[in-house]
Image (cartoon, coloured by chain):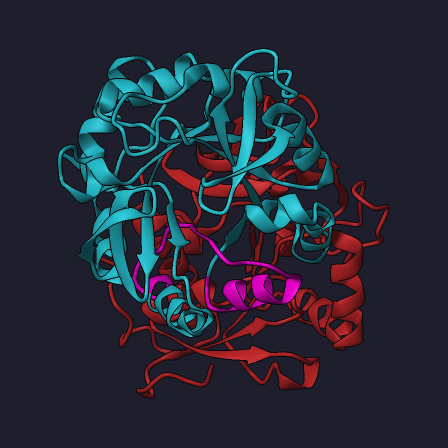
Chain colours: A red, B cyan
């Protein structure tokens, strides 16, 4: 997808490493006022205000494809500079040191592991579930406490540092539904598939990224209807 | 707490939503993306498109519909019907679907489930099991036989055996349809649902026979279903999704409220 019309759109790059449906996250970003670029290799990232790493599936093949595209170094540099980053589902799990799923060494941006949701009554954990915030964060501005978001996963992050946990969800066990540090945000649910509240979260993230990058957010929709 | 999902199913043939008694007496029920958007607005938790286009040349039309729907309805979309290979699945996911549903082809080639799950993850693979009751004394121990090709052809396979195998091969969900009940409005086959939901840990979606909100409650309470799918009662506007969810909530089942409802 190429940039949308209008100079006021916020440039956002979505990392395309072959891990699933990119149409819906791109559409949600466009609805949030972003001009979306899809990068199949690290040298196609450009200079966006926000880097989005989506994805579903297993960690080891995802890391292989990220490495093949030159993305590992690019993401490490990006997050080390505290530039705005949104990881979704697998894009969150990959931030930790390793995954119990297949023993993969992952990005190591956040200390901790990705573990199976042992004790869950059904796996995969599929469907809408409540996201309970542990603290305030601009990503959840205007979204009611305990709002439902859509999840599809069997594994979740287990951060060493509990202060990284922004929100939690319960499915037999409690797990981090969102983690945040500086301008980095990871969500285990799929905001692009979570209806109005999901679109609002994406819009909040785009707006915060524009502000953090010194771009004007004046042309952005104030909120998604 | 994880919500019990309400899922409208849109049977699509040659670019239009149709509804009959499973593949028979089809009646035009509207434009798929438009109907999908309406259901999303009214509180549908997911959508299923079942492509019943007979001719292969209709596939391009389906992919276009999936893409137009993904741009308008920001809730999960499953596409079933005619997915015969990993490549078919890739095309449907690229068009914007989140999951595909495998049915006849998976019965013919069970390893397709494993291949699809290995490539795209279990969460994207729904195995649809159409089952009918057969008399005791046949070669089907559970009394529930798998039928394929739109419910017309007995597969000689026990539905419970198939459910367990499909989950073991990597299905992330099972969509269980009672062919006896489908389109009849006589309620879900809760015995079939219970037999399968107590056998597997993956979520089970109930299908076939919904007449009203009480049937949705029964599918969850008696059948152990994680999600409930229906078509005709929504298309004909006999019941709204909100009415169904209100009945489920009144029965103590966790359902998702719309943001508008919470703010009201």
Horizontally, residue B52 falls left or right of residue B241, namely: right
Which residue is at the front of the view, A107 or B112? B112
Instruction: Tell me: residue B96, above or below residue B223.
Output: below
Give the quadrant of the C terminus of chain B. top left
The magenta segment is B69-96
Q: In the image, is residue B85 part of the stretch drawn in magenta? A: yes
Query: Measured along the vertical axis of the image, is residue A55 above or below residue B153?
Result: below
Above or below residue B105? Residue A13 is below
Residue B190 location, x and y as percent? 42, 16
Q: Nearer the viewer, residue A200 or B95?
A: B95
In the picture, residue B116 is in which quadrant?
bottom right
Q: Is residue B7 left or right of residue A87?
A: left
Horizontal and vertical percent position of residue A126: 52, 37
Residue found 35% across the figure and 55% down from its top: B74
- Lateral position of residue B261 relative to residue A189, left or right: left
Q: Residue at x 61, y 36 (%)?
A: A124
Residue A45 lies in quadrant: bottom right
Q: Is residue A177 visible?
A: yes
Residue A72 placed where, x, y %?
Answer: 76, 69
> In which quadrant of the rendered view does residue B126 lie?
top right
Does the magenta segment cover residue A44?
no
Q: Is residue A53 visible?
A: no
């Amino acid at each position: 997808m190429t940039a949308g019309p209008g100079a006021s759109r916020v440039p956002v790059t979505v990392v395309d490493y072959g891990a699933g449906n990119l149409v819906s996250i791109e559409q949600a970003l466009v609805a949030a006022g972003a001009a979306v670029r899809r990068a199949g290799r690290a040298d196609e990232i450009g200079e966006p205000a926000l880097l989005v790493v989506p994805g579903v599936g297993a960690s080891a093949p995802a890391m292989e494809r990220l490495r093949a595209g030159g993305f590992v170094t690019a993401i490490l540099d990006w997050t080390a500079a505290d530039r705005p980053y949104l990881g979704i589902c697998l894009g969150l799990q990959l931030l930790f040191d390793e995954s119990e799923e297949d023993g993969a060494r992952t990005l190591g941006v956040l200390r901790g592991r990705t573990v199976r949701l042992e004790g869950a009554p059904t796996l995969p954990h599929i469907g809408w579930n409540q996201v309970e915030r542990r603290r305030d964060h601009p990503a959840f501005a205007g979204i009611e406490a305990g709002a439902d978001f859509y999840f599809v996963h069997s594994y979740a992050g287990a951060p060493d540092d509990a202060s990284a946990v922004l929100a939690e969800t319960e499915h037999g066990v409690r797990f981090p539904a969102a983690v945040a540090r500086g301008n980095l945000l990871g969500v285990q649910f799929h905001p692009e598939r979570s209806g109005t509240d999901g679109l609002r979260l994406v819009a909040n993230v785009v707006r915060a990224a524009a502000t953090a990058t010194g771009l004007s957010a004046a042309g952005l929709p104030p909120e998604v209807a | 707490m994880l919500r019990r999902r309400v899922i409208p199913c849109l049977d699509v043939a040659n670019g239009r939503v149709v509804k009959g008694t499973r593949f028979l007496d089809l009646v035009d029920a509207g434009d798929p993306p438009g109907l999908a958007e309406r259901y999303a607005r009214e509180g549908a938790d997911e959508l299923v498109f079942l492509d019943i286009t007979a001719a292969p040349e209709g596939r391009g039309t389906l992919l276009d519909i999936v893409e137009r729907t993904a741009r308008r309805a920001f809730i999960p979309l499953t596409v079933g019907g005619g997915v015969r290979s990993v490549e078919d699945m890739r095309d449907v996911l690229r068009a914007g679907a989140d999951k595909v549903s495998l049915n006849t082809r998976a019965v013919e080639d069970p390893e397709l489930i494993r291949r699809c799950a290995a490539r795209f993850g279990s969460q994207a693979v729904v195995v649809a099991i159409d089952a009918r009751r057969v008399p005791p004394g046949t070669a089907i121990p559970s009394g529930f036989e798998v039928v394929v090709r739109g419910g017309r052809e007995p597969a000689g396979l026990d539905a419970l055996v198939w459910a367990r195998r499909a989950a073991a091969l990597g299905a992330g969900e099972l969509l269980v349809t009672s062919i006896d009940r489908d389109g009849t409005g006589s309620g879900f086959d809760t015995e079939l649902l219970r037999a399968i939901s107590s056998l597997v840990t993956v979520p089970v979606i109930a299908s076939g026979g919904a007449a009203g909100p009480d049937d949705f409650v029964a599918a969850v309470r008696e059948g152990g279903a994680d999600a409930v799918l229906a078509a005709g009662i929504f298309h004909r506007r006999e019941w709204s999704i909100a009415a169904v969810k209100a009945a489920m909530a009144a029965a103590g089942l966790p359902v998702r409220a719309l943001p508008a409802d919470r703010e009201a």
